[in-house]
Amino acid sequence: MTSHIRVKDDANNTENEQPRYLDNRFRRLYSLSAKYKQAETMQKTLLKLSTIANLALNPEQFYPELYQQLQKLITVDRFYIVLCCPRTGELSIPFYADQQQQAAPPENLTQLLRHGLTGYILRTGKALLANPTDIERLYQSGNITRRDNDCLQWLGVPTLAHGHVIGALVVQNRQEEFHFSPSDIALMEFISQHVAGVLERGNEHDEMERAISQHTLKLRQAYNKLKQEVRIRRRTELLQKSLYEIANLAAANLNDNDFYQQIHRVLRHLLPAHNCYIALIDEQTDQLTFPFYVSELASRHPLSRPRQDGLTEYLMAKGHPLLLNHAEITRLMTQGKIYRQAPILNNSNLMHQWIGVPLFIHGRIMGNLAIYSFRDQQQLQNQDVELLTFVSQHIATAIERKLNASAMQKSFERLEVMVNARTQELGRINQALELEILRRQKVEQQLTYDANHDTLTGLPNRAMFRERLTQAVRHLRRHKTDHFAVLFIDLDRFKLVNDTVGHVEGDHFLIETARRLRTCIRDNDTLARLGGDEFVILLDCIHQKEDVLEIGERVIRVLAAPYELSGQKFRSGASIGIAIATPQDSSETLLKNADNAMYQAKAKGKGCFVIFDPLRPSPRSGDGELADELAPALAAGQIKMQYLPIYKLNGNKIIAQEAKLYWEHPTLGHIHQLRLHTLAEQNGLRKELDNLAISLLINEWPIQPSNLPLHLTLSAESLRQPHSRKQLCHQLVSSDIPLSKLWLFFDEQALVQDSEHHVCSFDALSKTGVNLGISSYGTSFSALASLSFLPVTALKLDPCFATHLDSPRHLKLVKACFLAASALDLQVFCTGITSTAQQQAFIDIGIQWGQGPALGHSSYSHPQLHIA
């Protein structure tokens, strides 16, 4: 039983298991069939995907197709592609698809992805399959800073190119029944490779397009350059041909109309010169002419007109080419710069453009060449200005040659007329030639006379006198018993005459002197003027020395008489040097000896004559040596001080004294202060002389009951340099002299020549308490107004005022000076009084103080004066 039952149970089990087995097999076969279909679908999809990737021309076409094929393989709720720039690291999203959101991705999606799982893949370069748990773990570990909370599964793979991450492919799933598998990672990596390939081909295609574009651009540039070179070559050939034609036109024998028509024809080959004119200046009439003119709007040729303010004159004034448009021309007319006076030429207010180029003819702007247009279709450029400027130079040359040829032809015609006229005139000239010869003989005689005579006085001049003197010397050498003498005459105060009454009256003075000298000599004597105020007399055939002395005294007496000049009386006088000839003397020696004797006469006080003595040293020849002796004399203390009295004119009472330097020379004797100053100026020792005067004055200051004021004259050398001025002030302040009793005088001429230093120095000296004054007043006629700015309290008149008091006009001049000085509260001292008449004249004028020989001119070697 048991066996049977077991067998039966086994049979029943067998029957029950049979359907179950078949059912499992069926399910297995169905699963295999589904996998096979899925594999077939995946194979076809991947094959088509590969085909699409190979045929895609650019990524933008490939991404949508990729998304469609991807949906056939896996369930995708969201799919996007992210690219990363290898140079800048910036992210871009070329494709984005979301099943639930049809709108475009948010603007800040790239920043969100950089901090999420996508950024993690880009940094690591590895594929990632993550669920919410994995995402939370990555967030907690700090690998990402943003969580994707809206997906259940997240799958991303990197896109690689040459081993570098260039982007990522990401799919997301929000459905719980679908899950990504590792095979999906492989699928996404396969797709990522195709994406990388498409991107690489796209880049290569872009590079090829760029290369083709660059190559095409270079070819186009080369082609354009070649076209430009061809155009320039053709233009250059045309320009050369045009210039050659212009040069030929200048040499062609054409009239003016044909010449300018041909110029215009050549110009039209180069530029659109449908409207053109040439303007030139006629130098003879200074009119503006228009030798050539053509216009589309006007047929009447413009007439010549004076130069006014048209466009042509405006261009010539500018002196360089101009390109003006309608607006600029209108503005110039509105501003009144053009056509304010001149008539408007050829509707200038309607011109669209105007080019003007100046024409340089004979090195000057003599006109202009202009082309212009009335239509907008004709656009003139700056290169047209350059071309027209270049062509205009040759046109100007052609015009210049044309004008020269025309001028030459006219010159030939005038020359022929002149030749005919000259031929006719030759007869008349031959007739007049004899008269001209006679006239020239007279002129030669006059020239000979003028060459030997002074033009002012009519006396023989230096050349004629030297000739006669040479003849006299030769005669004396042959006839040693005969005698003659030379008188060298130098007028005193001639410079004062010129300075006082002018050079015209000075000439009259010389003429009168020559007349007086003629009365002093015989007919066989020779009177000559050497120049300036120097006269010379050759006394021929003298018998004894007394004859010469008589002539000398006569000359002194005649020249001492007053002269009447400009209504004034002047006294001059003369200094005469006499040289008596010996057979051994030459003409040069005689003149030199007479000249030296004249200087000896001047040294004696002027108004006298001296006969030359070879044993007596000449003042003139010795001045140089004497000037050299001055410095040692200063060092040795040979220069002394003397004191001259100053009087009250009414009563002759001594009211002050004047300190003056003198030099008692071992051989020359007493040398007064005036000559000392001259010697010091020759040696540059004037400042040292002033320092000596100050030192002597300080050491010899008189101690006396009368306590008289003391006058001292200094040179401008003490004022010119600041340190000299400070030294002078220091000497005065540190001395025991009561400065209120000291009067320092400075020469008026130096004041006029250098007033600026005098003003500064006078201010500094006045602060020391010393009194200041101007000496030799009247020699330079300084403005009295200038004295009002100086702290001076006295004027000392020049001795020339006393000399000419017998002249009424001169007397008025002295009165005017005194009244003006009195108005400025200045004390006035007169000098050089030689007569009681002069003293009384000064008293009548109102001057109270003075000095001179007529008052008493004794000098004192010791400063103490005892007044009764």
Image: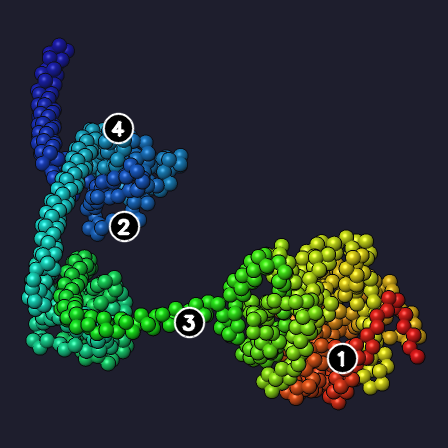
Q: Which residue is mark 3?
A: 446
| Disc 3 + disc 2, Cβ < 8 Å | no
Q: CA distance from mark 1 to mark 4?
A: 129 Å
Of residues 172 and 825, the one nearer the viewer is 825
Q: Which residue is mark 1?
A: 833
Q: Nearer the viewer, mark 2 or mark 1?
A: 1
Q: Nearer the viewer, mark 3 or mark 2?
A: 3
Of residues 51 and 215, the one nearer the viewer is 215
Q: CA distance from mark 2 to mark 4?
A: 31 Å
Q: Secondary structure at mark 3?
A: helix
Residue 846 in picture, x, y percent from top left: 75, 88
Circle nearer the N terminus (2, 4): 2
Q: Secondary structure at mark 2?
A: loop
**Left or right of 336: which side holds 348?**
left
Q: Residue at x 74, y 71 (%)?
A: 745
Circle nearer the N terminus (4, 3): 4
Mark 4 Cα-neighbour bin, 10 Å: few <14, some 14–19, many ≥20: few
Res. 22 visible in picture: yes
Q: Nearer the viewer, mark 2 or mark 4?
A: 4
* Three-letter residue code for mark 1: Ile
Residue 861 in picture, x, y percent from top left: 86, 66
* Three-letter residue code for mark 2: Pro
Q: Residue at x 10, y 50 (%)?
A: 237
* Dot label at residue 106: 2
Residue 219 in picture, x, y percent from top left: 12, 42
* Three-letter residue code for mark 3: Gln
Q: Which residue is mark 4?
A: 163
